[in-house]
């Protein structure tokens, strides 16, 4: 049986006091949503999206079943 899952990342899991949740099928979708969110809501610049931060995001991205 095929199990459907989605990826979910919570901004607060990497230490922000923030209710943002990114959801997507693939990690790059999560990262793209986080990059947009970080720039819009945390005043970060594209160059602040470092490899270290991306690693932190992927480490805190979890699979959830539908
Ligand atoms: Zn946030």
Image (cartoon, helix red, strand yellow):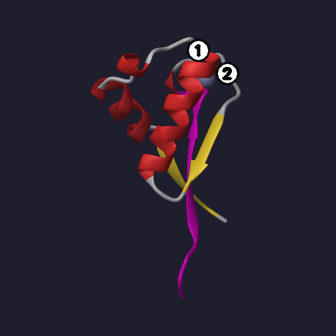
Q: Quadrant of ligand 1?
A: top right
Q: Residue 27: percent from the left, percent from the top?
A: 43, 50
Viewer-proximal residue among 25 and 15: 25
Which quadrant, please, contains the N terminus? bottom right
Q: Residue 43, image x and y in percent?
A: 56, 11
Q: Is residue 2 left or right of residue 57?
A: right
Residue appearing at x 33%, y 34% in the figure: 55
Disc 1 designates what residue?
A: 42
Residue that badge 2 annotates: 18
* Circle 2: element type: loop
User: In the displayed structure, would residue 48 be above or below residue 23?
Assistant: above
| Mark 2 → mark 1, Cα distance in angstroms | 9 Å
Q: Say which label, 2 or 1, has the lower sequence index.
A: 2
Magenta segment: does it hold 7? yes
Is 11 part of what is drawn in magenta? yes
Q: Residue furthest bottom?
A: 1
How crowded is the residue under tag 2: few (<14 C-alpha within 10 Å), some, or many (20+)? few
Given contact means CB atoms under 8 Å apart, are the residues at marks 2 and 1 in contact? yes
Point 32% across, 23% down: residue: 50
- The count of marks equals 2
Crowding around mark 1 (Cα neighbors within 10 Å: few <14, some 14 to 19, many 20+) is: few
Give above or below for 61 relative to 3.
above
- Magenta residues span 1-13
Q: For residue 10, which numbered disc appears in the image?
A: none
Q: Position of residue 10 (x, y in %)?
A: 59, 35
Residue that lies at the very extreme toward the top in this rendered image = 43
Q: Residue at x 42, y 21 (%)?
A: 46
> In front of the other: label 2 or label 1?
1
Looking at the image, residue 36 lies above or below residue 46: below
| Residue at image coords 60%, 48% | 23
Quick check: is the Cβ at mark 2 less than 8 Å away from ligand 1?
Answer: yes
Whether label 1 lies within 8 Å of ligand 1 gets the answer: yes
């Amino acid at each position: 049986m095929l199990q459907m899952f989605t990826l979910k990342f919570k901004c607060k899991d990497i230490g922000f006091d923030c209710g943002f949740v990114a959801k997507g099928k693939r990690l790059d979708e999560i990262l793209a949503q986080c990059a947009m969110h970080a720039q819009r809501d945390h005043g970060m610049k594209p160059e602040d999206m470092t490899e270290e931060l991306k690693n932190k995001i992927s480490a805190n991205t979890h699979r959830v079943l539908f």
